[in-house]
Image (cartoon, grey):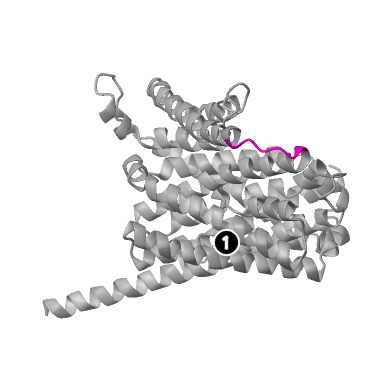
Amino acid sequence: MEPETITSFLAIGAIIFIGFFGNMFFNRYRIPDVLLLVMLGMAIGPDVLGQRFGLVTEDALLSIDQFKDMFLSAALVIILFDGGLSLDMKVVMESMRLSVFMSVLTFVAEISLIAVALHLILGMDLLVSLILGAILGGTTGAIVIPIANRMRIKPQTRSMVIMESVITDVLVIVTALTLISVAKLGIIDPVNVASELAVKFLVGAIVGFVAGIAWLFVLDRLHNQPLSYMITVAALFIVAGVVELPPVGSSGAVAALAFGLALGNRNFVKRRLPSVKLATLSDDHIHHFHTEITFFVRTFFFVYLGLSFRFETFTWIHLTAGLLVASLTSFTRHMTSTLTQKVGGLGNDDRRTIFALMPKGLSAAVLATLPATQLAGTSIWSADYAPLFLNVTLIVILVTTVIATVLSFRVERNTDRRQRQELRKRFAEER
Protein backbone atom coordinates (compact mmCIF):
# COMPACT_ATOMS: atom_id res chain seq x y z
CA MET A 1 0.00 0.00 0.00
CA GLU A 2 0.98 3.61 -0.54
CA PRO A 3 2.19 5.52 2.55
CA GLU A 4 -0.85 7.83 2.33
CA THR A 5 -3.17 4.81 2.35
CA ILE A 6 -1.43 3.29 5.36
CA THR A 7 -1.69 6.62 7.21
CA SER A 8 -5.39 6.85 6.35
CA PHE A 9 -6.03 3.32 7.64
CA LEU A 10 -4.25 4.08 10.91
CA ALA A 11 -6.11 7.38 11.32
CA ILE A 12 -9.53 5.80 10.66
CA GLY A 13 -8.83 2.98 13.12
CA ALA A 14 -7.59 5.40 15.77
CA ILE A 15 -10.65 7.66 15.35
CA ILE A 16 -13.04 4.73 15.78
CA PHE A 17 -11.15 3.54 18.88
CA ILE A 18 -11.23 7.02 20.42
CA GLY A 19 -14.92 7.38 19.57
CA PHE A 20 -15.66 4.00 21.17
CA PHE A 21 -13.83 4.77 24.40
CA GLY A 22 -15.33 8.27 24.44
CA ASN A 23 -18.76 6.64 24.23
CA MET A 24 -17.85 4.30 27.11
CA PHE A 25 -16.66 7.32 29.10
CA PHE A 26 -20.01 9.01 28.53
CA ASN A 27 -21.99 5.94 29.58
CA ARG A 28 -20.00 5.73 32.81
CA TYR A 29 -19.50 9.38 33.78
CA ARG A 30 -22.33 11.04 31.77
CA ILE A 31 -19.90 13.40 30.02
CA PRO A 32 -20.61 13.55 26.24
CA ASP A 33 -17.79 12.56 23.90
CA VAL A 34 -18.47 15.42 21.47
CA LEU A 35 -15.64 17.66 22.66
CA LEU A 36 -13.10 14.84 22.58
CA LEU A 37 -13.90 14.12 18.94
CA VAL A 38 -13.92 17.80 17.90
CA MET A 39 -10.55 18.38 19.61
CA LEU A 40 -9.19 15.26 17.92
CA GLY A 41 -10.21 16.72 14.55
CA MET A 42 -8.52 20.00 15.41
CA ALA A 43 -5.34 18.17 16.46
CA ILE A 44 -4.99 16.07 13.29
CA GLY A 45 -5.89 19.01 11.02
CA PRO A 46 -3.34 20.83 8.82
CA ASP A 47 -2.79 23.69 11.27
CA VAL A 48 -1.62 21.50 14.18
CA LEU A 49 -0.27 17.99 13.50
CA GLY A 50 -1.77 17.12 10.13
CA GLN A 51 0.74 18.83 7.87
CA ARG A 52 3.73 17.93 10.05
CA PHE A 53 3.03 14.20 10.34
CA GLY A 54 1.08 13.67 7.11
CA LEU A 55 -2.20 12.97 8.89
CA VAL A 56 -4.57 15.45 7.20
CA THR A 57 -2.66 17.77 4.88
CA GLU A 58 -3.97 20.84 3.07
CA ASP A 59 -4.51 18.80 -0.11
CA ALA A 60 -6.26 16.04 1.80
CA LEU A 61 -8.62 18.52 3.45
CA LEU A 62 -9.43 20.09 0.07
CA SER A 63 -10.26 16.62 -1.27
CA ILE A 64 -12.50 15.93 1.73
CA ASP A 65 -14.26 19.28 1.31
CA GLN A 66 -15.30 18.32 -2.22
CA PHE A 67 -17.61 15.71 -0.68
CA LYS A 68 -18.64 17.83 2.32
CA ASP A 69 -22.25 18.42 1.30
CA MET A 70 -22.86 14.77 0.48
CA PHE A 71 -21.23 13.54 3.71
CA LEU A 72 -23.05 16.01 5.95
CA SER A 73 -26.40 15.35 4.26
CA ALA A 74 -25.93 11.58 4.64
CA ALA A 75 -24.96 12.06 8.29
CA LEU A 76 -28.09 14.13 8.92
CA VAL A 77 -30.36 11.54 7.26
CA ILE A 78 -28.90 8.66 9.30
CA ILE A 79 -28.93 10.56 12.61
CA LEU A 80 -32.50 11.81 12.13
CA PHE A 81 -33.62 8.30 11.18
CA ASP A 82 -32.10 7.13 14.46
CA GLY A 83 -33.98 9.91 16.25
CA GLY A 84 -37.26 8.79 14.67
CA LEU A 85 -36.71 5.18 15.73
CA SER A 86 -36.27 6.27 19.35
CA LEU A 87 -39.40 8.46 19.57
CA ASP A 88 -42.86 7.42 20.70
CA MET A 89 -45.54 8.60 18.26
CA LYS A 90 -48.02 9.41 21.01
CA VAL A 91 -45.45 11.52 22.84
CA VAL A 92 -44.52 13.33 19.61
CA MET A 93 -48.15 14.26 18.98
CA GLU A 94 -48.57 15.50 22.56
CA SER A 95 -45.42 17.64 22.46
CA MET A 96 -45.69 18.93 18.87
CA ARG A 97 -47.51 22.18 19.67
CA LEU A 98 -44.95 23.13 22.32
CA SER A 99 -42.08 22.08 20.02
CA VAL A 100 -43.29 24.40 17.25
CA PHE A 101 -43.81 27.25 19.73
CA MET A 102 -40.30 26.85 21.15
CA SER A 103 -38.67 26.42 17.73
CA VAL A 104 -40.20 29.45 16.03
CA LEU A 105 -39.85 31.71 19.06
CA THR A 106 -36.17 30.87 19.58
CA PHE A 107 -35.35 31.05 15.88
CA VAL A 108 -36.92 34.49 15.36
CA ALA A 109 -35.43 35.88 18.58
CA GLU A 110 -31.91 34.65 17.78
CA ILE A 111 -31.96 35.99 14.22
CA SER A 112 -33.15 39.40 15.44
CA LEU A 113 -30.65 39.76 18.28
CA ILE A 114 -27.67 38.48 16.26
CA ALA A 115 -28.47 40.69 13.25
CA VAL A 116 -28.94 43.86 15.30
CA ALA A 117 -25.79 43.23 17.38
CA LEU A 118 -23.54 42.56 14.39
CA HIS A 119 -25.00 45.52 12.50
CA LEU A 120 -24.46 47.95 15.38
CA ILE A 121 -21.13 46.64 16.73
CA LEU A 122 -19.30 45.48 13.58
CA GLY A 123 -21.03 47.80 11.12
CA MET A 124 -22.13 44.93 8.88
CA ASP A 125 -24.90 45.51 6.37
CA LEU A 126 -28.19 44.63 8.08
CA LEU A 127 -29.19 42.12 5.41
CA VAL A 128 -25.80 40.37 5.65
CA SER A 129 -26.21 40.28 9.44
CA LEU A 130 -29.66 38.73 9.01
CA ILE A 131 -28.18 36.03 6.77
CA LEU A 132 -25.56 35.11 9.39
CA GLY A 133 -28.26 35.20 12.08
CA ALA A 134 -30.40 32.82 10.02
CA ILE A 135 -27.47 30.43 9.53
CA LEU A 136 -26.87 30.34 13.30
CA GLY A 137 -30.51 30.48 14.39
CA GLY A 138 -31.27 26.79 14.83
CA THR A 139 -30.09 23.77 16.79
CA THR A 140 -28.75 20.64 15.10
CA GLY A 141 -30.07 17.11 15.36
CA ALA A 142 -26.56 15.77 14.76
CA ILE A 143 -25.61 16.83 18.30
CA VAL A 144 -28.96 17.16 20.07
CA ILE A 145 -30.28 13.69 19.22
CA PRO A 146 -27.31 11.61 20.47
CA ILE A 147 -27.12 13.60 23.72
CA ALA A 148 -30.91 13.63 24.30
CA ASN A 149 -31.25 9.90 23.62
CA ARG A 150 -28.69 9.09 26.29
CA MET A 151 -29.93 11.52 28.95
CA ARG A 152 -32.32 10.38 31.66
CA ILE A 153 -35.06 12.89 30.84
CA LYS A 154 -38.81 12.73 30.35
CA PRO A 155 -40.00 11.33 27.00
CA GLN A 156 -41.94 14.55 26.32
CA THR A 157 -38.83 16.67 26.86
CA ARG A 158 -36.72 14.38 24.66
CA SER A 159 -39.35 14.50 21.91
CA MET A 160 -39.55 18.28 22.15
CA VAL A 161 -35.82 19.00 21.79
CA ILE A 162 -35.47 16.46 18.96
CA MET A 163 -38.43 17.90 17.07
CA GLU A 164 -37.06 21.41 17.62
CA SER A 165 -33.76 20.41 16.03
CA VAL A 166 -35.60 19.05 12.98
CA ILE A 167 -37.89 22.08 12.65
CA THR A 168 -35.06 24.60 12.97
CA ASP A 169 -32.83 22.67 10.56
CA VAL A 170 -35.45 23.31 7.87
CA LEU A 171 -36.10 26.88 9.03
CA VAL A 172 -32.39 27.67 8.85
CA ILE A 173 -32.02 26.36 5.30
CA VAL A 174 -35.17 27.99 3.88
CA THR A 175 -34.68 31.34 5.64
CA ALA A 176 -30.97 31.63 4.80
CA LEU A 177 -31.51 30.75 1.14
CA THR A 178 -34.45 33.20 0.95
CA LEU A 179 -32.40 36.05 2.44
CA ILE A 180 -29.52 35.30 0.05
CA SER A 181 -31.98 35.51 -2.86
CA VAL A 182 -33.28 38.81 -1.52
CA ALA A 183 -29.70 40.13 -1.31
CA LYS A 184 -29.05 39.11 -4.91
CA LEU A 185 -32.35 40.11 -6.50
CA GLY A 186 -33.78 42.61 -4.02
CA ILE A 187 -37.18 40.89 -4.11
CA ILE A 188 -39.03 39.02 -1.36
CA ASP A 189 -42.25 37.04 -1.77
CA PRO A 190 -43.78 36.14 1.64
CA VAL A 191 -46.35 33.84 0.05
CA ASN A 192 -43.62 31.89 -1.74
CA VAL A 193 -41.58 31.59 1.48
CA ALA A 194 -44.61 30.33 3.43
CA SER A 195 -45.51 27.80 0.74
CA GLU A 196 -41.92 26.57 0.56
CA LEU A 197 -41.82 26.03 4.33
CA ALA A 198 -45.11 24.14 4.16
CA VAL A 199 -43.79 21.91 1.38
CA LYS A 200 -40.52 21.28 3.23
CA PHE A 201 -42.30 20.16 6.39
CA LEU A 202 -45.64 18.66 5.44
CA VAL A 203 -44.80 16.85 2.22
CA GLY A 204 -41.55 15.45 3.60
CA ALA A 205 -43.27 14.24 6.77
CA ILE A 206 -46.22 12.67 4.92
CA VAL A 207 -44.10 10.94 2.28
CA GLY A 208 -41.60 9.70 4.88
CA PHE A 209 -44.28 8.36 7.24
CA VAL A 210 -46.32 6.67 4.49
CA ALA A 211 -43.14 5.11 3.09
CA GLY A 212 -42.27 3.91 6.60
CA ILE A 213 -45.67 2.24 7.00
CA ALA A 214 -45.27 0.58 3.59
CA TRP A 215 -41.80 -0.60 4.59
CA LEU A 216 -43.22 -2.26 7.72
CA PHE A 217 -45.12 -4.64 5.44
CA VAL A 218 -41.94 -5.29 3.46
CA LEU A 219 -40.12 -6.11 6.72
CA ASP A 220 -42.96 -8.49 7.56
CA ARG A 221 -42.09 -10.46 4.43
CA LEU A 222 -38.36 -10.19 5.12
CA HIS A 223 -38.63 -11.37 8.73
CA ASN A 224 -35.62 -13.52 9.71
CA GLN A 225 -34.03 -12.88 6.32
CA PRO A 226 -30.36 -11.82 6.26
CA LEU A 227 -29.43 -8.22 5.33
CA SER A 228 -32.93 -6.90 6.09
CA TYR A 229 -31.34 -3.92 7.86
CA MET A 230 -29.09 -3.01 4.94
CA ILE A 231 -32.02 -2.96 2.54
CA THR A 232 -33.84 -0.75 5.07
CA VAL A 233 -30.94 1.71 4.87
CA ALA A 234 -31.24 1.58 1.08
CA ALA A 235 -34.97 2.38 1.36
CA LEU A 236 -34.17 5.24 3.74
CA PHE A 237 -31.78 6.91 1.30
CA ILE A 238 -34.17 6.39 -1.62
CA VAL A 239 -37.02 8.04 0.31
CA ALA A 240 -34.79 10.93 1.44
CA GLY A 241 -33.55 11.43 -2.11
CA VAL A 242 -36.91 11.15 -3.86
CA VAL A 243 -38.59 13.83 -1.72
CA GLU A 244 -35.79 16.26 -2.61
CA LEU A 245 -36.37 15.84 -6.36
CA PRO A 246 -38.55 18.27 -8.32
CA PRO A 247 -41.45 18.81 -8.49
CA VAL A 248 -41.75 17.73 -4.83
CA GLY A 249 -38.69 19.63 -3.59
CA SER A 250 -39.29 18.77 0.07
CA SER A 251 -36.86 17.99 2.92
CA GLY A 252 -35.05 14.66 2.93
CA ALA A 253 -34.16 15.24 6.59
CA VAL A 254 -37.81 15.53 7.63
CA ALA A 255 -38.68 12.47 5.53
CA ALA A 256 -35.88 10.49 7.22
CA LEU A 257 -37.23 11.36 10.68
CA ALA A 258 -40.79 10.42 9.68
CA PHE A 259 -39.58 7.17 8.06
CA GLY A 260 -37.83 6.20 11.31
CA LEU A 261 -40.86 7.29 13.35
CA ALA A 262 -43.10 4.88 11.42
CA LEU A 263 -40.66 1.98 11.77
CA GLY A 264 -40.15 2.64 15.48
CA ASN A 265 -43.91 2.72 16.18
CA ARG A 266 -45.13 -0.54 14.66
CA ASN A 267 -47.73 -1.04 17.42
CA PHE A 268 -49.10 2.47 16.93
CA VAL A 269 -49.52 1.83 13.20
CA LYS A 270 -51.09 -1.57 13.88
CA ARG A 271 -53.70 -0.02 16.21
CA ARG A 272 -54.58 2.61 13.57
CA LEU A 273 -54.88 -0.01 10.79
CA PRO A 274 -56.75 -2.88 12.50
CA SER A 275 -58.14 -4.25 9.23
CA VAL A 276 -54.68 -4.73 7.74
CA LYS A 277 -52.58 -7.74 8.68
CA LEU A 278 -49.37 -6.58 10.29
CA ALA A 279 -47.64 -9.02 12.59
CA THR A 280 -46.28 -7.72 15.90
CA LEU A 281 -42.59 -8.43 15.38
CA SER A 282 -39.52 -7.25 17.21
CA ASP A 283 -37.21 -5.02 15.20
CA ASP A 284 -34.50 -4.97 17.85
CA HIS A 285 -31.87 -6.06 15.32
CA ILE A 286 -32.64 -2.98 13.22
CA HIS A 287 -32.32 -0.70 16.26
CA HIS A 288 -29.09 -2.33 17.39
CA PHE A 289 -27.44 -2.32 13.98
CA HIS A 290 -28.51 1.23 13.28
CA THR A 291 -26.99 2.29 16.59
CA GLU A 292 -23.66 0.95 15.31
CA ILE A 293 -24.00 2.83 12.00
CA THR A 294 -25.03 6.03 13.78
CA PHE A 295 -22.00 5.77 16.08
CA PHE A 296 -19.70 5.46 13.07
CA VAL A 297 -21.26 8.40 11.20
CA ARG A 298 -21.48 10.79 14.16
CA THR A 299 -17.89 9.99 15.21
CA PHE A 300 -16.53 11.12 11.85
CA PHE A 301 -18.97 14.06 11.72
CA PHE A 302 -17.55 15.56 14.91
CA VAL A 303 -13.98 14.88 13.83
CA TYR A 304 -14.74 16.67 10.56
CA LEU A 305 -16.04 19.69 12.49
CA GLY A 306 -12.67 19.83 14.23
CA LEU A 307 -10.85 19.54 10.91
CA SER A 308 -12.81 22.55 9.62
CA PHE A 309 -11.14 24.87 12.13
CA ARG A 310 -8.41 26.87 10.36
CA PHE A 311 -6.47 28.76 13.00
CA GLU A 312 -4.45 30.71 10.45
CA THR A 313 -7.52 32.68 9.32
CA PHE A 314 -8.72 33.61 12.81
CA THR A 315 -8.58 37.24 13.90
CA TRP A 316 -9.55 38.90 17.16
CA ILE A 317 -12.59 40.34 15.41
CA HIS A 318 -13.75 36.86 14.42
CA LEU A 319 -13.18 35.54 17.93
CA THR A 320 -15.00 38.48 19.52
CA ALA A 321 -17.91 38.21 17.08
CA GLY A 322 -18.15 34.45 17.63
CA LEU A 323 -18.20 34.79 21.42
CA LEU A 324 -20.74 37.61 21.15
CA VAL A 325 -23.07 35.51 19.00
CA ALA A 326 -22.66 32.51 21.34
CA SER A 327 -23.51 34.75 24.32
CA LEU A 328 -26.60 36.09 22.57
CA THR A 329 -27.61 32.53 21.73
CA SER A 330 -27.31 31.51 25.39
CA PHE A 331 -29.25 34.58 26.57
CA THR A 332 -32.02 34.00 24.03
CA ARG A 333 -32.18 30.31 24.89
CA HIS A 334 -32.52 31.08 28.57
CA MET A 335 -35.41 33.47 27.94
CA THR A 336 -37.31 31.22 25.52
CA SER A 337 -36.82 28.06 27.62
CA THR A 338 -38.20 29.92 30.65
CA LEU A 339 -41.19 31.15 28.63
CA THR A 340 -41.76 27.65 27.24
CA GLN A 341 -41.70 26.27 30.79
CA LYS A 342 -44.46 28.68 31.80
CA VAL A 343 -46.57 28.09 28.69
CA GLY A 344 -46.21 24.31 28.80
CA GLY A 345 -46.30 23.85 32.56
CA LEU A 346 -42.89 22.13 32.55
CA GLY A 347 -40.65 21.39 35.52
CA ASN A 348 -37.29 22.97 36.30
CA ASP A 349 -35.38 19.92 35.04
CA ASP A 350 -37.23 20.17 31.72
CA ARG A 351 -36.34 23.85 31.42
CA ARG A 352 -32.68 23.17 32.19
CA THR A 353 -32.57 20.39 29.61
CA ILE A 354 -34.16 22.60 26.93
CA PHE A 355 -31.74 25.40 27.76
CA ALA A 356 -28.73 23.05 27.65
CA LEU A 357 -29.48 21.50 24.26
CA MET A 358 -28.72 24.59 22.18
CA PRO A 359 -25.78 23.45 19.98
CA LYS A 360 -25.44 24.61 16.41
CA GLY A 361 -23.94 22.28 13.86
CA LEU A 362 -24.67 20.65 10.56
CA SER A 363 -26.87 23.12 8.69
CA ALA A 364 -24.75 26.04 9.89
CA ALA A 365 -21.54 24.30 8.79
CA VAL A 366 -22.97 23.61 5.33
CA LEU A 367 -24.40 27.11 4.79
CA ALA A 368 -21.49 29.15 6.21
CA THR A 369 -19.56 29.12 2.92
CA LEU A 370 -22.59 29.70 0.66
CA PRO A 371 -22.96 33.53 0.93
CA ALA A 372 -19.37 34.05 -0.27
CA THR A 373 -20.11 32.23 -3.54
CA GLN A 374 -23.65 33.60 -4.02
CA LEU A 375 -23.12 37.26 -3.05
CA ALA A 376 -19.64 37.92 -4.44
CA GLY A 377 -19.76 41.06 -6.56
CA THR A 378 -22.91 42.49 -4.95
CA SER A 379 -22.81 45.92 -3.35
CA ILE A 380 -23.47 44.63 0.19
CA TRP A 381 -20.76 41.93 0.20
CA SER A 382 -17.16 42.44 1.25
CA ALA A 383 -14.30 39.98 0.74
CA ASP A 384 -13.65 40.16 4.51
CA TYR A 385 -17.05 38.62 5.19
CA ALA A 386 -16.12 35.18 3.80
CA PRO A 387 -13.63 34.17 6.56
CA LEU A 388 -15.77 35.98 9.15
CA PHE A 389 -18.86 33.89 8.28
CA LEU A 390 -16.92 30.62 8.43
CA ASN A 391 -14.93 31.38 11.58
CA VAL A 392 -17.83 32.86 13.53
CA THR A 393 -19.93 29.84 12.62
CA LEU A 394 -17.25 27.40 13.75
CA ILE A 395 -16.65 29.29 17.00
CA VAL A 396 -20.38 29.30 17.78
CA ILE A 397 -20.63 25.57 16.99
CA LEU A 398 -17.74 24.82 19.35
CA VAL A 399 -18.89 27.13 22.17
CA THR A 400 -22.53 25.97 22.10
CA THR A 401 -21.33 22.35 22.01
CA VAL A 402 -19.18 23.03 25.09
CA ILE A 403 -22.17 24.63 26.83
CA ALA A 404 -24.42 21.69 25.92
CA THR A 405 -21.77 19.25 27.16
CA VAL A 406 -21.29 20.97 30.52
CA LEU A 407 -24.95 21.75 31.16
CA SER A 408 -26.22 18.30 30.16
CA PHE A 409 -23.73 16.82 32.65
CA ARG A 410 -25.02 19.19 35.35
CA VAL A 411 -28.64 18.28 34.57
CA GLU A 412 -27.78 14.59 34.90
CA ARG A 413 -25.91 15.18 38.17
CA ASN A 414 -28.72 17.27 39.66
CA THR A 415 -31.28 14.65 38.65
CA ASP A 416 -29.22 11.90 40.29
CA ARG A 417 -28.80 13.98 43.46
CA ARG A 418 -32.52 14.72 43.69
CA GLN A 419 -33.43 11.07 43.14
CA ARG A 420 -31.03 9.99 45.90
CA GLN A 421 -32.53 12.57 48.25
CA GLU A 422 -36.08 11.40 47.45
CA LEU A 423 -35.02 7.77 47.98
CA ARG A 424 -33.46 8.57 51.38
CA LYS A 425 -36.56 10.53 52.37
CA ARG A 426 -38.80 7.60 51.38
CA PHE A 427 -36.70 5.16 53.42
CA ALA A 428 -36.82 7.52 56.40
CA GLU A 429 -40.61 7.77 56.19
CA GLU A 430 -40.99 3.98 56.00
CA ARG A 431 -38.96 3.57 59.18
Location of residue 89 by image quarter: top left
Residue in the image at 52% along x and 60% along y: 24
Residue 187 screen position, x and y as percent: 71, 37
Residue 102 screen position, x and y as percent: 45, 53
Location of residue 424 by image quarter: bottom left
Quick check: is 188 in the magenta stretch? yes
Q: Is residue 300 visible?
A: no
Query: What is the residue that sits farthest to the left in this orientation?
Result: 431
Residues in magenta?
185-190
Residue in the image at 76% along x and 56% along y: 125
Say left or right for 166 vs 3.
left
Q: Nearer the viewer, residue 341 or 145?
A: 341
Predominant SS along the magenta part: loop
Q: Nearer the viewer, residue 401 or 172?
A: 172
Secondary structure category for the residue under label 1: loop
Disc 1 residue type (three-letter): Asp
On screen, residue 404 above or below 103: below
Q: Residues within 10 Å of mark 1 (few under 14, many from 20)?
A: many
Q: Nearer the viewer, residue 46 or 111?
A: 111
Quick check: is 68 in the magenta stretch? no
Say left or right for 136 vs 311.
left
Residue 250 screen position, x and y as percent: 57, 30
In this figure, what is the number of numbered marks?
Answer: 1
On screen, residue 401 above or below 225: below
Image quarter of the C terminus: bottom left
On screen, residue 424 above or below 300: below
Residue 335 screen position, x and y as percent: 48, 65
Q: Which residue is mark 1?
A: 33
